[in-house]
Image (cartoon, rainbow, N blue to C red):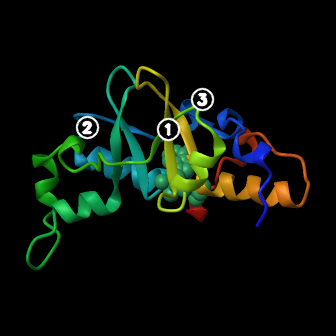
């Protein structure tokens, strides 16, 4: 396959779903709150930020359910004992918005979404595998690239 070097080295900025449109939780939030945001948003995992909007990890429904999994049942009463920082995944796919598309393509093999941060670790938004695939597809079909704003996924489909 002969991928156009121009595509591979292009900046990912235009594909990013802006932080204002990304469902997230904050360090210290309760598991109950995180589960509510996850269920309401329809996403299986969302970023965890601090009060300064710096990125610390992401939390998923699976992280939460695993924490309250007892021997024979989910011990929902345990949700009050923990906060998201105690269950979140910290080894996540993250990039700077100045990074090249090739890095995003590589990370998207194993991650449904990539968190984008600035030089100070401040969260800028996310890049989804879906938008990366859409870009590659449109590139090969020689179609114009849509802006990330037009690709915000419908949560029901997640
Ligand atoms: P998609 O490729 O659109 O299905 O998105 C892949 C994953 O990215 C979802 O399962 C979520 O974990 C995350 N995601 C996508 N859009 C958002 C959003 N607006 N807010 C929070 N997380 C999102």
The reply to whether the C-beta atoms of the residues labelled 3 and 2 are less than 8 Å apart is no
Identify the secondary structure beneath mark 3: loop
Earlier in the chain: of badge 3 and badge 2, it is: 2
The residue sitting at 32% across, 48% down in the picture is 91
Residue 66, picture quadrant: bottom left
Quick one: which residue is furthest to the bottom in this view? 72
Q: Is residue 87 left or right of residue 112?
A: left
Q: Name the residue under label 3.
A: 98
Circles 1 and 2: CB atoms closer than 8 Å: no
Which residue is under mark 2?
A: 29
Q: Which residue is drawn at 55% across and 55% down?
A: 106
For the residues labelled 1 and 3, the Cα–Cα distance comes to 8 Å
Where residue 74 appears, as percent x and y from the top left, is 17, 69
Q: Name the residue under label 1.
A: 95
Q: Which image quarter holds the C terminus?
A: bottom right
7 to the left or right of 43:
right
Q: In which quarter of the image is residue 150?
A: top right
Q: Measured along the vertical axis of the image, is residue 133 above or below residue 103?
A: below
Please name whichever residue, 34 or 19, is drawn nearer the observer in this view of the structure: 19
Q: Can residue 126 be seen in this view?
A: yes
Q: Which residue is drawn at 58% across and 48% down?
A: 104
- Looking at the image, residue 33 sits to the left or right of residue 78; the answer is right
Cα separation, mark 3 vs mark 2, equals: 31 Å
Residue 63 in the image, given as x and y percentages of width and height: 27, 58
Q: Which residue is drawn at 38% across and 48% down?
A: 92
Pointer 1: residues within 10 angstroms few (<14), some, or many (20+)?
A: many
Badge 2 crowding class, 10 Å Cα cut-off, few under 14, some 14 to 19, many 20 or more, is some
Q: Height in image: 100 above or below 45?
A: above
Residue 27 versus residue 111: which sits nearer the camera? Answer: 111
Q: In this view of the protein, which residue sits in the foreground, 93 or 149?
A: 93
Q: Give residue 46's position: percent from left, percent from top.
A: 42, 47
């Amino acid at each position: 396959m002969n991928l156009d070097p121009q595509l591979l080295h292009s900046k990912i900025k235009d594909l990013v779903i802006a932080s204002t449109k990304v469902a997230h939780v904050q360090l210290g939030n309760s598991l109950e709150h995180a589960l509510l945001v996850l269920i309401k948003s329809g996403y299986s995992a969302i970023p965890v930020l601090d009060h300064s909007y710096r990125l610390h990890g992401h939390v998923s429904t699976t992280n939460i359910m695993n924490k309250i999994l007892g021997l024979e049942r989910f011990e929902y009463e345990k949700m009050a004992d923990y906060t998201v920082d105690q269950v979140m995944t910290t080894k996540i796919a993250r990039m700077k918005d100045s990074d090249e598309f090739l890095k995003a393509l590589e990370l998207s093999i194993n991650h449904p979404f990539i968190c984008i941060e600035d030089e100070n670790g401040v969260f800028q938004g996310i890049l989804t595998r879906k938008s990366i695939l859409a870009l590659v597809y449109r590139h090969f079909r020689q179609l114009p690239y849509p802006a990330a704003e037009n690709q915000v996924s419908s949560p029901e489909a997640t």
